[in-house]
Image: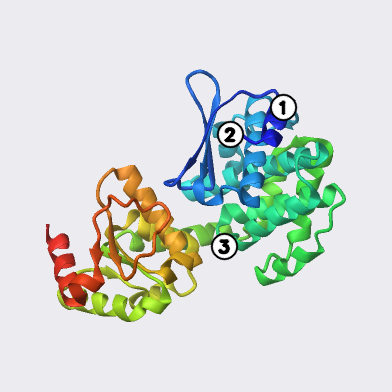
Amino acid sequence: MKTIYKKIISDLNINIGEVNYEIYLGADIYYKKNESGYWDIQIYKRTQGTPLEKYMFVSALITIKRKEDKWYKDETEPLSVIGKQILQELRIDQTEKTEGIICEIIDSLNYSLEVDMILKKQYLTHDDIRELIKYYQQVSIVQSMLFQFLAGISALRHNGGDTTNFHETFVQKKIYNAFQIIDIYEKCIKNQIICKSDVKEIFNLLYPNLYNKIKIMEIISNQDETQNYDVALSFAGEDRPIAKKIADELTKQHYKVFYDEYEQASLWGKDLYAHLNDVYKNRARYCLMIISENYSKKVWTSHERKAAQTKAFLNNKEYILPLRIDETEIDGLNETVGYIDLKQVGIDKAIDLLKQKLNS
C-alpha cells in the first residue's frame, strides 16, 4: 500500500484490511466491512497506477470514515424511515424509482461533505478534485454521477477552488438551475448538517412534474423487460462488417440479436450508458465479443465488456463468447477462456458454431 494512503488511514483512525486489484469488478472501487471489523478494499485493476486510482482510493477512505464516525449532523437517518417521510411530504408515490432518487440525492449531500474534508485536510489538491469532477462530468449521463458532479463542484467552490470550466456543462446538460442546487450543497457544507428540507429542495429543482415522468418511465421499463436477446454483439466500429454479417445471418434464422443498427429507433434518446449496461449485464443469454486491436482501444467497448464480465463473474457460468480477429489481449479476459479464431475457421464456420451454441 502506498505511503500516502497509510498516512491518511492513520490520520483518520480507520481499520483497513486487505487491499486488492481485481479484474472483474462492476465499479472502479468497492469496499466492504469484513467479519473482523476491518474494511477490505477492491480496486478495478485497469485504474492501477493512474490518477483516478488515487482519487477513488482517497474518496473511499473518507466514505469509510463517514460510515464509522460521521463528523457532521444528518437529519436523514434512518434512511428507510426518513426517505418515506420525504416522499410523503412531497406528495410523490413511493416507488423503487422515487426511493432511488432520494437515496442518490442524500448520498451526494454526504459526498459534498466528504470532498470538503478531503480539501480541508489537504489529502487531495484543488487540481485533483477538478480532475475527479471531470470524470463525473464525462459519465454524468448516469443520474447518480450527475449528483456527484454537482456535489464535487460545490465542495470545490466552498474551499476557494475555480469551477468556471464546468459552467458550460450546465447548459449542455440543461441543468439551468445548477447554481441553486450548488448553493444548497454549499449551505450543508457551511453548516455541517444535512437537513430533510435540503433533500426536498434539490428533488423539486431537478424533478418538477416528476409524477408524470415516473409513470412514463415505468411504462417504458415494462415494455423493455420483454425485449430479451439470444446474443448481444460487442465490437469496435472498424469491425462492423464482421458484426453485421453475423447479425444478419442469425436474424435470418430468427435468433434475437442485439446489434446497434437494429436498435436505432429504440436507442434514440435513451441514456446509453445505463441502457447498454443493462443489455450486456442482464438481458442477453450470451455476449459475442469480437476481439481486435481496435476493440481494446474503444471507450464504449470497454463499458460493454465490463458489464459482460460482471454478469459472467456473478453467474459463475459461461456467458462471454470471444471471437478473435487478431492476437490482441483484452484486460479481464482469461487466457483459459475458450475462443474461436476467425482467421482459422472463417466467418461462415464461426456463425455455424455460434448457432450450435445458441441451440445448446
Q: Are marks 3 and 1 in contact (CB under 8 Å)?
A: no
Viewed as shown, does residue 43 lie left or right of 348? Answer: right
Above or below, 328 against 43 in this view is below
Q: Nearer the viewer, residue 52 or 81?
A: 52
Above or below, 146 against 167 in this view is above
Select label 3 or label 2 by which is in front: 3
Give the SS element for disc 3: loop
Disc 3 versus disc 1: distance between alpha carbons?
Answer: 33 Å
Does label 3 or label 1 sit earlier along the sequence? 1
Residue 266 occupies quadrant: bottom left
- Quadrant containing the N terminus is top right
Q: Nearer the viewer, residue 161 or 219?
A: 161
Mark 3 crowdedness (10 Å alpha carbons): few <14, some 14-19, many ≥20? some
Residue denoted by label 2: 79
Mark 1 crowdedness (10 Å alpha carbons): few <14, some 14-19, many ≥20? some
Q: Position of residue 86 (x, y in %)?
A: 62, 41
Q: Evaluate whether residue 275 shows in this view.
A: no
Disc 3 versus disc 2: distance between alpha carbons?
Answer: 25 Å
Give the SS element for disc 2: helix
Residue type highlighted by circle 2 = Leu
Q: Position of residue 312 (x, y in %)?
A: 32, 49
Q: Position of residue 95 (x, y in %)?
A: 47, 47
Does label 3 or label 2 sit earlier along the sequence? 2
- Quadrant containing the C terminus is bottom left
Residue type highlighted by circle 3 = Ile
Residue denoted by label 3: 141
Residue denoted by label 1: 12
